[in-house]
């Protein structure tokens, strides 16, 4: 299989682009693209929406202020000194406004915490969005929340369609990185579709093939798929959606992908560090994880991202890994891991899971803030 054959399978349709670029809020969930909408700088942002993905099958409601932050119900009209950036675990997909960890935590400390998370974001996209927001609406305290797939999204020029062969409301082009861990190089690249016209060009097989002809993630994916065709070995899952035969090539490519992804995140965190130092802001890094990654820790197995965590924990600012909090919490009850995680997880965190995250962050956040929030004034 070559690039053209593979891309033909995931080619965007004109209707998908129509839904994605429309900024008007539509009543139909799919026509509204579930809230995701095109942005030339960062790839996509969010508009008001509702979805049918909540706990117990309930609808979830998502609303945003004029600056793009998720609506703050606890302290409307107050200026926040804490801004949070990241992907859907920051945005808090699958819960309604008022059920996010920012709202629970803000309610507790007595001040607003603004939520600029966007589903599907990489760490690098979070950085790009932070630069845009802070230029016009600055805050002193910056919380960067990183999810386990965000490392890999740093390297994606076209999210989802290449690496997973799947289509979602945010399966579009995004600013990304080209990295080489061996030489220590990291190149920042803008969104491949900086205009709506360019986005519609993705529906043309010739255009999308030329646009992605030298993309390393496409090359890796094709190598894995071609190895799968040629091999009779058992097909096994690799990290984060990639599948390939259990072969030396697959293992080598998987290891290289992981190394490049974690290196990319390290470089983006360094960008956050440089920016916050230059502007007099303070940084906190929080690590969120999918259910399977947390379960691995609860079963006593090694963390897959140990090299990055070792580096992060040497940094001169707070770093919170929610696996640590889950491990401590799990030790108090000791059911099987799935029963334990059912109380918090519905894919993303349920309301109870976001409350858990707020509690896990509370002490570090209060120590970090100066002056202390009003709930902790002596």
Image (cartoon, helix red, strand yellow):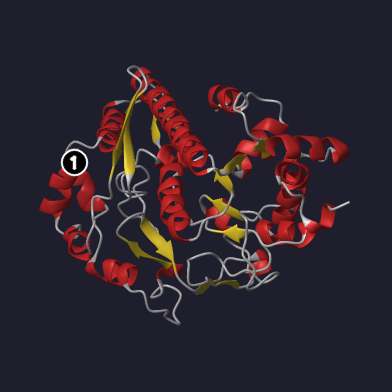
Q: Is residue 68 above or below residue 9?
A: below
In-front residue for pair 60/138: 138
For mark 1, what is the residue?
A: 3
Q: Is residue 208 left or right of residue 36?
A: left
Mark 1 falls on what kind of element?
A: helix
Question: Residue at position x 17%, y 38% from top?
Answer: 2
Q: Is residue 230 left or right of residue 256?
A: left
- Residue count near mark 1 (Cα–Cα under 10 Å), binned few <14, some 14–19, many ≥20: some
> Which residue is farthest bottom?
27
> Which residue is farthest left?
206
Task: Residue 338: name its quadrant.
Answer: top right
Question: Residue at position x 52%, y 58% from top?
Answer: 116
Task: Residue 226: name its quadrant.
Answer: top left
Image coords of residue 184 (percent x, y)? 36, 21
Q: Is residue 93 left or right of residue 357?
A: left
The reply to whether residue 245 is in sight is no
Question: Residue at position x 48%, y 57% from top?
Answer: 118
Q: How many marks?
A: 1
Question: Residue at position x 53%, y 39% from top?
Answer: 148
Q: Is residue 309 above or below residue 335?
A: above
Image coords of residue 193 (percent x, y)? 23, 55
Locate the N terminus and report the quarter of the image it occupies.
top left
Image coords of residue 339 (percent x, y)? 76, 46
In-front residue for pair 252/351: 351
Q: Is residue 17 left or right of residue 77?
A: left
């Amino acid at each position: 299989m070559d690039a053209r054959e593979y891309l033909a399978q995931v080619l965007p349709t004109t209707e998908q682009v129509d839904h994605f670029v429309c900024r008007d809020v539509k009543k139909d969930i799919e026509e509204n693209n579930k809230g995701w909408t095109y942005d030339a700088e960062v790839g996509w942002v969010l508009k008001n929406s509702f979805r049918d993905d909540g706990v117990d099958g309930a609808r979830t409601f998502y609303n945003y202020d004029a600056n793009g932050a998720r609506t703050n119900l606890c302290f409307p009209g107050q200026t926040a000194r804490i801004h949070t950036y990241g992907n859907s675990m920051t945005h808090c997909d699958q819960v309604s406004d008022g059920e996010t960890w920012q709202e629970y935590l803000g309610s507790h400390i007595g001040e607003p915490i603004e939520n600029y998370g966007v589903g599907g974001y990489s760490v690098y996209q979070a950085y790009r969005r932070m630069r845009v927001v802070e230029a016009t609406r600055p805050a002193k305290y910056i919380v960067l929340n990183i999810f386990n797939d965000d490392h890999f999204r740093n390297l994606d020029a076209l999210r989802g369609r290449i690496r997973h062969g799947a289509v979602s409301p945010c399966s579009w082009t995004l600013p990304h990185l080209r990295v080489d861990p061996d030489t220590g190089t990291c190149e920042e690249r803008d969104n491949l579709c900086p205009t709506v016209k360019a986005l519609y060009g993705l529906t043309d097989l010739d255009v999308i093939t030329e646009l992605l002809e030298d993309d390393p993630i496409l090359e890796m994916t094709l190598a894995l798929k071609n190895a799968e065709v040629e091999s009779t070995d058992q097909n096994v899952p690799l990290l984060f959606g990639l599948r390939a035969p259990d072969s030396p090539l697959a293992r080598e490519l998987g290891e290289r992908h992981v190394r490049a992804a974690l290196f990319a995140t390290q470089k983006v965190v360094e960008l956050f560090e440089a920016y916050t130092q230059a502007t007099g802001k303070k940084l906190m890094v929080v690590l969120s994880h999918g259910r399977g990654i947390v379960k691995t820790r609860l079963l006593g197995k090694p963390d897959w991202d140990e090299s990055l965590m070792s580096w992060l924990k040497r940094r001169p600012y707070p770093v919170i890994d929610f696996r640590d909090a889950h491990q401590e919490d799990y030790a108090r009850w000791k059911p099987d891991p799935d029963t334990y995680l059912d109380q918090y997880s519905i894919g993303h965190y349920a309301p109870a899971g976001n409350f858990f995250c707020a509690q896990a962050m509370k002490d570090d956040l209060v120590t970090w803030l100066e002056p202390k929030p009003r709930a902790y004034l002596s």
